[in-house]
Image (tube, grey):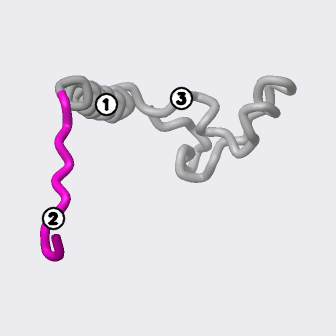
Amino acid sequence: MIGKKKIIKMNRLSWLLLILLVILGISRIWSVEQKGSFSWTKCKESLFVHIISNKCTLREMYTDKENQIYH
């Protein structure tokens, strides 16, 4: 028994779930790159503060010298 490697076999359902997760991950990354960030992610405040107070102070990376939002 010593020296034998344990081989993990995946059944069809496991392979299907793995493929769906990979497709979901790739599509999520692709959609974020195409659309850009959500508007609330550009704020210094948390999502909760943004929703409650409707206040948004832009992060430095989203502003240029004239304080305009990059699109």
Between marks 3 and 1, how big is the CA–CA gap? 22 Å
Instruction: Tell me the number on the disc at residue 10.
Output: none
Residue drawn at x 70%, y 45% as measured from the top left: 44
In the displayed structure image, the side of residue 40 where residue 30 appears, left or right: left
Q: Quadrant of residue 20?
A: top left
Could you tell me the amino acid type at mark 3? Phe
Q: Nearer the viewer, residue 18 or 28?
A: 18
Residue drawn at x 85%, y 24% as measured from the top left: 52
Tag 2: Cα neighbours inside 10 Å, few (<14), some, or many (≥20)?
few
The answer to which of marks 3 and 1 sits earlier in the sequence is 1
User: Residue tagged by mark 2?
Assistant: 5
Disc 2, SS: loop
**Residue 8 at x, y = what percent?**
20, 48
Tag 3: Cα neighbours inside 10 Å, few (<14), some, or many (≥20)?
few
**Residue 66 at x, y = what percent?**
58, 44
Main SS of the magenta part reads loop
Tag 1: Cα neighbours inside 10 Å, few (<14), some, or many (≥20)?
few
User: Residue tagged by mark 1?
Assistant: 21
Q: Nearer the viewer, residue 32 or 8?
A: 8
Residue drawn at x 38%, y 31% as measured from the top left: 32
Q: Nearer the viewer, mark 3 or mark 2?
A: 2
Please report the bounds of the magenta region as a residue range: 1-11
Check contact, mark 2 vs mark 1: CB within 8 A: no
